[in-house]
């Protein structure tokens, strides 16, 4: 069924007729309370259309909530004058399509594409919140947290850092974790240390029912069983330790607790990938103290490059050795007028690795499936696999498997 939320009766009737003619079984609601009640009664609703009379902010809030609770339910927003700001917010919230209500064809196409995505999601492998399957030879529990064989060497902690927001830390951390897990051949834990504004749960469409905040009560006496109870499995070989949902909880997570968690995790996993906030917070500094590989991100604009150089100098000051750094230029090749020589001059070191810029990255973020999982043959996935093989001794066991790709979800439909 298609639910149409439109407060103005005449507009609602017009849109309902349009959708009805195209074969949608339409249920019209006039306010958010009714919409919420309808969805509670039938959580499987595949499509919710916000009409032009609905406040776009309501659509954004609604979509952000639904993408965690009901990833299969698509949200389409009909707005005649969606500017770049609204489109950005819509993308971040997980609205699948924004279409002009004055263009009936565009409205129907947008709804059709969203329904197709819902169909594909329903048919997708049951990773993450859609009901994990234990891989063969294991016995349930979080994917990566099977009991370690005796005498296994300690894992390596890889911390992704940058001192400017938006460089791609979460993007790189999530894709790197998927790559290192290599379909279940290695045990990997992805830790979200952006304790106030962590994005890993959203990036992987996971529901944070438990996470790092729950470790506070176990401080000083955390053991393997306790840590396992805090993990959210994502896919074979990859577990996550999610950031608190409320920023106030994040304030209580101190450096000593983070050190305790990461030291223990290192004994349980082959790799621990740590995503960090865009500054040297207490938790991030504690992570650096136990880090084996510092993945320092840069992006090709002079302000970010200058901040990356400051991050490198800060690592120098903290005594973290240069030979354990992987300086990585994200969005490499963007046509922004900087040559590789310019980049090297500002950074004062040549980058060890390059990750290309691609519009598929934000699209994959919007879908909640990292490119490394959805399309291992993509140039971004290959760059991250190359980084893992060259700098983290983690070459893939076999040729990359190409999983079924899906089209981008957010597209502006023009009238
Ligand atoms: N290689 C890339 N090509 C294109 N877009 C990218 C690339 N890497 C990251 N992005 C986009 O940049 C934006 C910021 O990425 P991301 O959230 O990973 O950064 P971040 O450093 O974790 O940000 P924050 O500091 O807010 O935590 C996202 O919209 C993401 O899709
Ligand atoms: Mg981030």
Image (cartoon, helix red, strand yellow):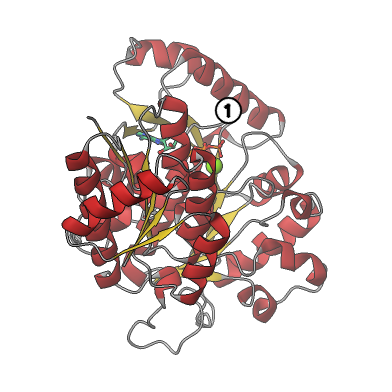
Residue 207 picture quarter: bottom right
Taking the image in four quarters, ligand 2 sits in the one at: top right
* 360 with respect to 253 (left or right): left
Q: Is residue 228 left or right of residue 167?
A: right
- Quadrant containing the C terminus in the rendered view: top left
How far from the left and from the top, in percent, is residue 201?
A: 53, 57
Q: Residue at x 48, y 13 (%)?
A: 302
Identify the residue under disc 1. 164
Q: Along the line of sight, which residue is nearer the eye, 135 or 195?
A: 195
Location of residue 366 with respect to 36 vertically, above or below: above
Element at label 1: loop
Q: How many labels were placed on the picture?
A: 1
Occupied quadrant, residue 317: top right
Q: How dense is the environment of label 1, judged by Cα within 10 Å: few (below 14), some, or many (20 and up)? A: many
Quadrant where the N terminus is found in the figure: bottom left
Depth check: give the residue in front, 297 or 347.
Answer: 297
Pinpoint residue 338: horizontal percent, then vertical percent.
35, 11
Asked if residue 19 lies left or right of residue 211, the reply is: left
Rendered residue at 58%/60% (across/down): 33
Give the answer, above or below, for where 47 lies relative to 361. Answer: below
Q: Is residue 208 visible?
A: yes
Q: Nearer the viewer, residue 1 or 186?
A: 1
Tell me if 386 is positioned left or right of 104 in this view: right
x 24%, y 66%: residue = 119
Q: Could you say where residue 253 lies in the image, as x and y percent from the top left?
A: 77, 54
Inspect this view and state whether residue 168 appears.
no
Residue 378, quarter of picture: top left
Q: Nearer the viewer, residue 410 or 217?
A: 410
Q: Position of residue 377 (x, y in %)?
A: 20, 50
Disc 1 residue lies near ligand 1 with CB under 8 A: yes
């Amino acid at each position: 069924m298609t639910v149409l939320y439109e407060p103005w009766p005449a507009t609602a009737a017009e849109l309902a007729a349009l959708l009805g003619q195209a074969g949608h079984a339409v249920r019209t609601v006039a306010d958010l309370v009714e919409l919420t009640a309808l969805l509670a009664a039938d959580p499987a609703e595949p499509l919710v259309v916000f009409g032009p009379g609905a406040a776009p902010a309501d659509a954004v809030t609604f979509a952000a909530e639904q993408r965690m609770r009901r990833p299969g339910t698509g949200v389409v927003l009909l707005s005649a004058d969606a500017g770049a700001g609204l489109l950005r917010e819509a993308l971040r919230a997980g609205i699948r399509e924004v279409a002009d209500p004055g263009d009936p064809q565009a409205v129907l196409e947008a709804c059709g594409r969203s329904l197709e995505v819902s169909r594909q999601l329903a048919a997708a492998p049951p990773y993450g919140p859609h009901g994990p399957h234990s891989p063969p030879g294991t016995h349930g529990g979080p994917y990566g947290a099977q009991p370690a064989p005796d005498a296994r060497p300690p894992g390596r902690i890889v911390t992704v850092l940058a001192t400017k927001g938006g460089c791609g830390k979460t993007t790189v951390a999530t894709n790197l974790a998927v790559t290192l897990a290599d379909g279940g051949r290695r045990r990997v834990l992805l830790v979200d240390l952006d304790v106030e504004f962590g994005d890993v749960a959203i990036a992987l469409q996971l529901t944070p029912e438990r996470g790092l905040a729950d470790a506070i009560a176990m401080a000083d006496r955390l053991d393997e069983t306790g840590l396992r109870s805090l993990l959210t499995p994502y896919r074979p070989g990859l577990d996550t330790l999610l950031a608190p949902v409320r920023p106030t909880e994040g304030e209580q997570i101190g450096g000593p607790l983070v050190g305790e968690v990461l030291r223990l995790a290192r004994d349980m996993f082959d790799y621990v990938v740590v995503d960090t906030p865009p500054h040297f917070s207490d938790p991030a500094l504690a992570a650096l103290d136990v880090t084996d590989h510092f993945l320092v991100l840069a992006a090709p604009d002079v302000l970010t490059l200058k901040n990356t150089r400051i991050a490198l100098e800060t690592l120098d000051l903290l005594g973290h050795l240069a030979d354990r750094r992987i300086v990585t230029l994200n969005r490499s090749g963007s046509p922004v007028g900087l040559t590789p020589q310019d980049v090297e001059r500002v950074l004062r070191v040549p980058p060890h690795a390059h990750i290309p810029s691609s519009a598929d990255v934000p699209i994959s973020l919007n879908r909640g499936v990292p490119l490394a999982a959805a399309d291992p043959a993509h140039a971004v996935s290959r760059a991250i696999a190359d980084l893992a093989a060259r700098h983290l001794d983690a070459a893939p066991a076999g040729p990359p498997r190409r999983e079924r790709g899906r089209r981008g979800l957010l597209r502006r439909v023009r009238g």
